[in-house]
Amino acid sequence: MRRKLEISELIFKIISYLLLTVFAVGCLYPFIYTISSAISGYVEVRDSTIVLFPKNVQFDAFADVFNNNVFWNAYTNTLFLTFYGTLWEMMLSIFGAYALSKKRLLFRKGFNFFLVFTMWFSAGLVPQYLNYLATKRVFQGVGIMDDKWLVVIAMGMQAMNIILLRNAFEGVPSEIEEAAIVDGATEWQVLWRVYLPMSKSIIATVALFFGISRWNGYFWARQMISSVNEQPLQVYLRLRLEEYSDPEITTNWQLSHNYAPDSLIYALIVCSIIPLLVIYPFIQKYFAKGVNVGGVKE
Amino acid sequence: MAVEATDYLIFDEESGTYIENPEQAVRDDVEKHYWLNVLRTVLKDWRLYVMLVPMLIVFLFWRYFPMYELLGSFKLTEEAKTVAEQYYSGFSYFRTLITGLGNTELSMQFWRAFRNTFLLSFYGLVFGFPVPIIIALFFNEIRSNIARSIYQVLTYLPKFMSTVVMTSLVIMLVKQGSDTSGMQPGVISQLLHNMGLISSETAYSGLLNNPSFFRAIYQISGIWEGAGYDSIVFFAAIIAISPTSYEAAQIDGAGKMSQMRYVVLPFILSTIVIMLITRIGSLLNVGYEKVLLLYNPNTYVTADVVSTFAQRNGIAGSLKGLVSAAEMMNNVIGMLLVIGANTIAKKASDTSLY
């Protein structure tokens, strides 16, 4: 039985659709504008006449981005950091969270506090910086010259993600674990065959969080990676942005280019978000899941 | 039946006598061998502890060592150039920061940064906090699943972007005009100018070079980035409301506003309270990366926060001890806020956040 909408309900519905559409378009618009500006001609970008669609289309900005070896280097570095960083963090987090989820673990409360305290209090940027510098020296001392490994190993662990995993593991019924042990499963087998398959979606969510923050990581990578060839994409993008906001560089730009310096930045932005945009529709549901679990629990 | 004395007493072979208080003796024994027992338990379950240790080491090395170094930074480690500077290092860093003795300029900067940190968060709370709730209410109005998914996909999208990409977009959209190359100001600046909100000079000189626009840009870009994503948790609370609740209200003749007031609000109130408390807890925890990428010397007045102050003077500069003290003050107050907020949340809703 459908009931006629009250007038106030109808008005609210219309407002909802209207404002949501405005907001959704507002979320999307900068990306469309970016793509359009990246492939528009010099004069159009200079005069800011692009509203939505590209004008006087050129692809030279993209071509120049692709022809730069440093760009590909940065891309490879970001892939490296994302892959090994996520792998390293997931390994430590899964093992750690599994141990923490066990009631029989001695000093369990103490270990939990050890984790949670890092969410409450951080030493601050300067002591962290000095610590990373010291770590860098140690790494170089043992022959790890590549600063990327420093970023992979020393940075990015997040107590929150470990707690998400721990809560998921605690939710696995202990009867299943006991049954597996009766069948002769070892600790490793219990983890791999019982716990991981039973908390697949939260593991995917946590891996996604780690992966995204690795892909997007900027600050410490910029501080700690000294060699240009080891810089990740985000640092590369920012350095180009700083470079091209200098009017000196752009003075005689038009003589040698048919696109504006801005287009190069826009093209770089497009290149750095394309992989995320491609996988976004598939992982979006996991992205949303982390909030519901992480926001309010126990 | 009488209990034989020997059932109770334990014969100690060493001294050749019976122990008088066996229960106490057992307790003493356990206490004496406490660490041995711990070791025994650990060895029996060694796999569990092997799994735990790497994670602990990472946290120890790269989270706790800096805290230890923080304490070390209050010793006279800095290369003090004059006697006066030496005098003001150590724990008098705090005095310098708070009262300005020894380095008035830096103390002024610190208080400015502290104030900005608080204000950026506070405005974020006032303007940014209600938006996700409103969006969640709007989502609830959309009955078609496909339409809702499209809206959700679009509004969560900016959260995916890195701070560098997001700030690059902001910088490009409100960038300054240039005489030498004939560049026009960014498209948003022009839009605001055409709407008559800002003068053409303001648009031309770049909104990010103008301290009075920094907070607005920071908040609006923050809402653009996070409001859709932050609405998830509220939407989850709203969608859990049973349709019969609405029907009952409708039969009673409740209009939309009354339904909001008497049906929706009571249901999502606990979520709102928890989220609000969390936000209050992190009032002194501003995303420094974003500020660092958006600010410039022209906007330090409104933009400089404690972390960027630390980055500028401690990492790029050389005032490591003084800056560590500044950050420590900020972070200790921040920690007290978090713990306080968590305690209140626990009391308010039986929900602990950590």
Image: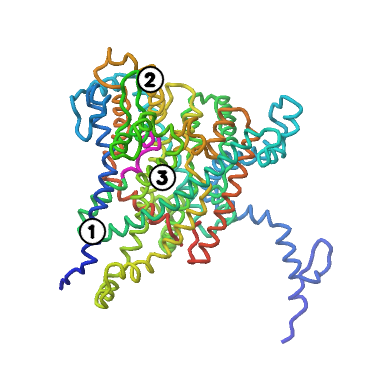
Look at the magenta stretch and give its main secondary structure: helix
**B161 relative to B36 in the view: left or right:** left
Q: Residue at x 33, y 27 (%)?
A: A265
**B25 relative to B133 in the view: left or right:** right
Q: Residue at x 48, y 50 (%)?
A: B122
| Position of A92 relative to A109 (above/below) | above
Seen from the viewer's position, the closer of residues B218 and B285 is B218
Marks 2 and 3 sit apart, C-alpha to C-alpha, by: 28 Å
Q: Say which residue label 2 marks.
A: A247
Residue count near mark 1 (Cα–Cα under 10 Å), binned few <14, some 14–19, many ≥20: some
Residue count near mark 2 (Cα–Cα under 10 Å), binned few <14, some 14–19, many ≥20: some
Image location (x, y in percent) of residue B16: 83, 65
Q: Say which residue label 3 marks.
A: B219
Circle nearer the viewer, 1 or 2: 2
- Chain letter for mark 3, please: B
Find residue B142 and name its label: 1
- Chain letter for mark 1, please: B
| Position of A29 relative to B124 (above/below) | above
Residue B68 part of the magenta-drawn span: no
Tell me which amino acid carries mark 2: Pro
Residue range in magenta is B157-168
Seen from the viewer's position, the closer of residues B46 and B65 is B65
Circle nearer the viewer, 1 or 3: 3
